[in-house]
Amino acid sequence: MRRQQILAAREFISRMEAAGVLNDFGDGSSINISTISPVIRFCESTAEHRIFCYGKFFQRVPTTNRVGRQLRALVYDTGQVFPILMGMFELASGTYTLGCRDEYLGWGEPSKRAIKERGLRRIMDLASVVALPPYNLLFGGKLMAALALSDTVRREYERRYKSALLGLVATSATGLHCAILNRIGLKPGGLYRRIGATTGYSTLFISPHTLSEARRFLPRFTSAPEGEFSVSVRPLHVLRTALRSCGIAPDRILRSAYPKGVYFGTISDKHIVALREGRTVTGPGLPLDAIVDYWRDRYLAKAVADHRRVADFLAHRRCGPIS
């Protein structure tokens, strides 16, 4: 699927590289590991969103674009001679219903609907986490996942959506366990905890053209207004409706994937209680400096001690996803 996505976007990739996007990337031999200094830059301009879209082609498992609220961030290493793009992450609106999430937060009962709808405005999905080469060799994915829960992100979310951000839901792309999310010890028990698994439904194999055709079976389909939720905007719901309209049992087509681990990330158990009870909670988030210091001590030091990993890092030369 990744190969197909890259081939379909070959023209876009070529235009970006001709415009100099690879100047934002670094060679391993030119990066001073001891001076790495991550800074988060939120995508605002068209150029920044294009860089983000280009960077997503480095994902091993492709993801689809989401609807609703969205927060994209580029992470640059400003400790070098010129800023180098380390990676990126993306927060997006979650699905209205997710069994293990709703059970974990106590949202399963109809009587909890008001609490759930308030809670959905205070959580997001961690839709993408990408550590770009050669920083992926330094456990950069761990850093990107932790930065998504930083105070810097919390403040930006509150500025954009006038709501607190109390937690992130992440789904493992490769099975029940997600190496990037496990054992980030910035809080007791880990910053992210696995709370269950998906039931095996997937829409990744559906092409954009097929999904567009399926939307014709929803004549009143519109994207949900900012801050509101509608199950009808989700690809899974759209495809179910279209398949039933064609006399095809949806489960035979859509339940085609293996179960994937579902993780919940939060900086405090108080935030989980607030989501379960619909309470207001205040307090500082995780300082970016504290996250970076933890990553340096726990993961960067581990990478530097691995001579083979360091050799691969130094040998890396900047290249695009097609290369």
Image (spheres, rainbow, N blue to C red):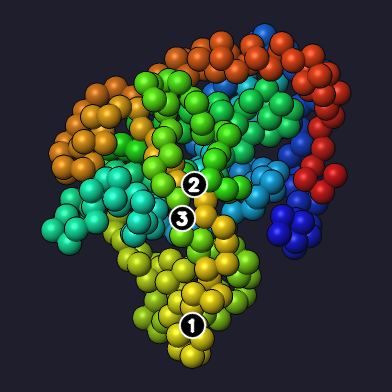
The answer to whether residue 294 is above or below residue 212 is: above
Residue at point 71% right, 59% down? 1
Q: Pointer 1: what residue?
A: 249
The mark that comes first in sequence, 1 or 3, is 3
- The label shown at residue 41 is none
Residue 12 visible in rendering: no
**Observer-nearest residue: 154 or 196?**
196
The mark that comes first in sequence, 3 or 2, is 3
Residue at point 59% right, 54% down? 63
Determine whether, in the image, residue 29 is placed left or right of residue 206.
right
**Observer-nearest residue: 221 or 277?**
277
Q: Residues within 10 Å of mark 1 (few under 14, many from 20)?
A: few
The answer to whether residue 75 is above or below residue 277 is: above
Q: Secondary structure at mark 3?
A: loop
Percent across and percent down for residue 160 are: 35, 42
Percent across and percent down for residue 218 are: 41, 81
- The label shown at residue 261 is 2
Residue 248 visible in rendering: yes
Q: Residues within 10 Å of mark 3 (few under 14, many from 20)?
A: many
Displayed quadrant of residue 138: top right
Q: Quadrant of the C terminus?
A: top right
Percent across and percent down for residue 203 are: 55, 66
**Are the residues at dot 2 and dot 1 in contact (C-beta closer than 8 Å)?**
no
Q: Secondary structure at mark 2?
A: strand
Q: CA distance from mark 2 to mark 1?
A: 26 Å
Residue at point 39% right, 53% down? 94
Q: Pointer 3: what residue?
A: 198
Q: Secondary structure at mark 1?
A: loop
Residue at point 54% right, 63% down? 202
